[in-house]
Image (cartoon, rainbow, N blue to C red):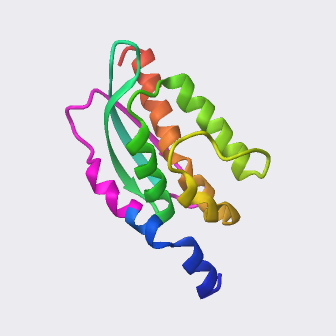
Amino acid sequence: MTARSGASLYTPELLALAVSLADYPLSPDLPLTGSARSRTCGSTLTMALECDASGRIVRLGMQVAACAVGQAAAALFAAKAAGADRSHIAATLAEFESWLAGEGDLPDWPGLAPLVPARTYPARHGAMVLPWKAALDALSNRQRGS
């Protein structure tokens, strides 16, 4: 990776998103917990959620060990997750994975544009989808009655 290509990936907007992740701390009072790990880079994300009676996310917190791209993706997820349910998150994840593979459009999740330059960095793809995978894991715990 050249300095120029790295600069185009780590834009001020992406780095600001990564810093904003501090607005979503992992909290022990959130009843549902899930996690995900990227096989490509080893990044991890633990997410705790609170849902309403319909299974829609009301509140969340995260602990993220990932590159700035993964942190930015987590912040983008967190900023727009309120009101999302399991089916919406699963559909978005499927669209996201297709887009990363070059087979579809960017998912309809608000604010994902800062992640577009990372599409050409396959080593970052696993970190980018961690929040959706961890949310599905947490919501699966809800379905099991945990």
Considering every residue shown, the one lying at the far bottom of the view is: 3
Q: Is residue 117 magenta?
A: no
Kindly tell me whether residue 65 is visible in this rendering: yes
Q: Which residues are magenta?
A: 17-43
Q: Quadrant of residue 94?
A: top right
Relative horizontal placement of residue 24, taking residue 36 as reference (left or right) = left
Where is 19 relative to 29, above or below?
Answer: below
**What percent of the width, then of the height, locates residue 65?**
40, 58
**What percent of the width, then of the height, locates residue 59?**
30, 33
Q: Quadrant of residue 108?
A: top right
Relative horizontal placement of residue 63, taking residue 72 as reference (left or right) = left
**What percent of the width, then of the height, locates residue 35?**
43, 40
Kindly tell me whether residue 38 is visible in this rendering: no
Frontmost residue, 143 versus 53: 53
Considering every residue shown, the one lying at the far left of the view is: 29
Frontmost residue, 59 versus 42: 59
Relative horizontal placement of residue 15, taking residue 91 as reference (left or right) = left
The quarter of the image holding the N terminus is: bottom right
Q: Residue at x 70, y 65 (%)?
A: 120
